[in-house]
Image: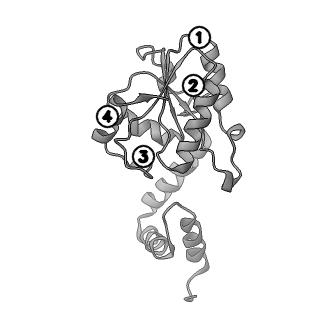
Amino acid sequence: MINTVRPVEELIARLKQLPSIGYKTAERLAYFLLNASDEDAKGLAEAIIRVKDTVKTCSICYNIAEEETCAICRDATRQNDMICVVEEPKDIFAIEKTGKFHGRYHVLMGSVSPLDGIGPEDLTIDDLVGRIRQGGIQEVIIATDSDTEGESTAICIAQKLKPLPVTVTRLAYGLPVGSDIEYADPASLSLALEGRKEM
């Protein structure tokens, strides 16, 4: 390894832990931060600490929130008879950008992945069932990714909800197979929402 200053190597090692960041990118980011003003570097550090200290999980839908419940769950103008189920909070932002969905959400906090030791019981599927049993929900839209894990998760949810008096739909395949919802453009997501089908 090239002989560099230990704090810089430690920063590179930390940056490498971020998704899609290899050594070269981490190195560029580390040297960018090294050359940044003290104000900018401290601002970034404080923003990271503030996020870790203040952002929590919504007690209803598992979206990210600053309070006990998220802004969407507190919004009285949204439809209460429809829940869109997503894998991660970041998927909510992708769907919200379409402007086509005005119901509620439920975040699974992952997807079924036997290779990673994640089964249906490790997700928030039981909490989703509990929300539906409270009544008022007419449709559940499953908006998991179209990869193998997302499909397995969608099937598990559909089976769990089968005995309940609710219509279960899945996003239409306007989304590329094997892609993540967070990377889909708003037009593709809009078409997928409009073309959803019953499972």
For marks 4 and 3, the one nearer the N-term is 3
The residue at the point 59 percent across, 71 percent down is: 13
State the image coordinates of residue 55 (x, y, percent, origin top left): 57, 38
Asked if the residues shown at circle 2 and circle 1 are in contact, with their CB atoms under 8 angstroms apart, the answer is: no
Residue placed under numbered mark 4 in the picture: 190
Badge 2 crowding class, 10 Å Cα cut-off, few under 14, some 14 to 19, many 20 or more, is: some
Residue 66: x %, y % from top left: 55, 32
Query: How much space separates mark 4 and mark 3, taking CA atoms?
Result: 13 Å
Q: Secondary structure at mark 4?
A: helix
| Mark 4 crowd level (few <14, some 14–19, many ≥20, 10 Å Cα) | many
- Answer with left or right where residue 75 lies relative to residue 59: left
Type of amino acid under label 3 = Glu
* First in sequence: mark 2 vs mark 1: 2
Query: On the image, which quarter does residue 158 sit in?
Result: top right
Cα separation between marks 2 and 4: 26 Å
- Mark 1 in CB contact with mark 4 (< 8 angstroms): no
Q: Is 181 on the left or on the right of 125, as rendered?
A: left
Q: CA distance from mark 2 to mark 3?
A: 22 Å
Q: Residue 68: x percent and y percent?
A: 61, 26
- Give the Cα separation between the discs numbered 2 and 1: 20 Å
- Please give the label number shown on residue 182: 3
- The image's mark for residue 135 is 1
Circles 2 and 3 in contact, beta carbons < 8 Å: no
Mark 4 is on which residue type?
Ser
Q: Could you tell whether 9 is left or right of 194 in the image?
A: right
Closer to the camera, 173 or 43? 173
Element class at badge 3: helix
Reading the image, the residue beneath label 2 is 69
Query: 63 above or below 148?
Result: above
